[in-house]
Structure formats: C-alpha cells, structure tokens
Image (tube, rainbow, N blue to C red):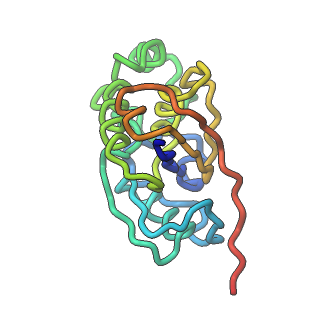
Amino acid sequence: MACTHRVYLVRHLKTTANEKRQYCGWTDSGLVLEEGDAIEFPVEVKHVTGSDLKRTRQTAAIYFPGVEFTEDARWRECHFGDFEGKTFEELKGNVDYTKWLENPWQQSPKNGETLGQVKSRALEAFCELPNEAVVVTHGGVIRLLLELFSPEPRSFWEWNVQNGSIWQFECADEQQWKEGKPCTSLLEVPITAKRST
C-alpha cells in the first residue's frame, strides 16, 4: 500500500509593500513586523526551503526558529517588471497594464514574466520536494499550485491566500503530482502559536 505524500506551502507574513498594496514580485521588501511567534506544526520541521527573497527568509526565521533554510529562486513571486512598486491606482489606464490583466498567463509586464513562466519554474521545484517538505514562498506561487492540484476546479483568482497562511497538499504518492494529477486533499492548516517552555 502506497504511503501518503504531503508537502506544506507557507505564504510569507505581511510586508511593507503589502500594506501599501503595491505589486511586489522580485522587489526585496521586508516584513512589517520582524518579530512574532513560532508556530505549532503538524509535523516535526527539521528543514525549510523557499524563495531567496528577504520576506520569506524572515518568515521562516519567525515561524521555524533555528531550523535550517535553503534558498531556491524558483520559489520567487512573479516578476512584475515595470509594474514593481506600483499600485492599481497608479497603473489603471496604462495600456500595457490592461493587456497584462487580460491575459497574464501569456502576456508579461515589460521587463517581467508571465504567470505561465512562474508556473513552469514553481512546478519544477514542487515536483522535486520530498515527503513532508515545508516551503516558504509567495501568494501568487501558492495560488498557481492550488489551481493546478485542487481536486475541485477553482481558478487562480478564486483562491484567497492570506499572509502567513499554511497550505497542505496531500497525494497518494509523489508520482501523482509529477503526472499533473489533482491532489487527494488540499487544505489550509490552522495556525497555533507555539508556547514557550
């Protein structure tokens, strides 16, 4: 009988750019609060991987203090190119922005990347994960993978991935998602602060 294969994706905590509602892909924005509670986790966490940007490294240090963290640029958010650091209000009416909103899967912001390109690199990294891996990454990346592997059809824009949220992907075995098949189950994991001893 095949054993269950699980991985956990964690969205970084709130950044200064999130507060200002700016597009923040590869811009290295830090967290609003650089301190917080370590968390209780469904499995023992001995190693964490994730995006090489500051906000993910800071989140990993808060949630999993003292745990080794390995950087992998494939877990980065979408590169928003010339839209980086700008808000919807600043961009509305911009022809390039409108084209991108209409088809972000194939249309990239100038000097940026498409969601299709993000999906390709994130999926490659995802399929390499060992059982019970923990990844700290970004909202767009998590939504891409939720859309791809959800047992129930739901579009990229329908997923609500809050800062600091944790998502458990569960399959019968790792081959299931290497073949692009939906997960057996997908759920958001409740967050509980770890009591200091």
Please tell me which residue is depicted at 49% across the width and 70% down the height of the picture: 61
Between residue 76 and residue 68, name the one nearer to us. 68
Image position of 96 (left or right of 8): left
Q: Is residue 155 above or below residue 173?
A: above
Q: Position of residue 63 (x, y in %)?
A: 57, 66
| Total numbered labels placed on residues in the image | 0
Please tell me which residue is depicted at 39% across the width and 58% down the height of the picture: 49
Q: Position of residue 8 (x, y in %)?
A: 52, 50
Image position of 68 (left or right of 38): left
Residue pushed farthest bottom? 197
Between residue 46 and residue 90, name the one nearer to us. 46
Question: Which quadrant would residue 122 be assigned to in this image?
Answer: top left
Residue pushed farthest left? 111
Q: Is residue 42 above or below residue 10?
A: below
Q: Quadrant of the C terminus?
A: bottom right
Q: Position of residue 157 (x, y in %)?
A: 58, 24
Question: Is residue 135 visible from the viewing direction of this image?
Answer: no
Q: Is residue 133 above or below residue 2?
A: below
Q: Position of residue 105 (x, y in %)?
A: 39, 19
Please tell me which residue is depicted at 64% across the width and 44% down the height of the picture: 162
Please tell me which residue is depicted at 52% across the width and 26% down the height of the picture: 147
Question: Is residue 140 visible from the viewing direction of this image?
Answer: yes
Residue pushed farthest front? 1
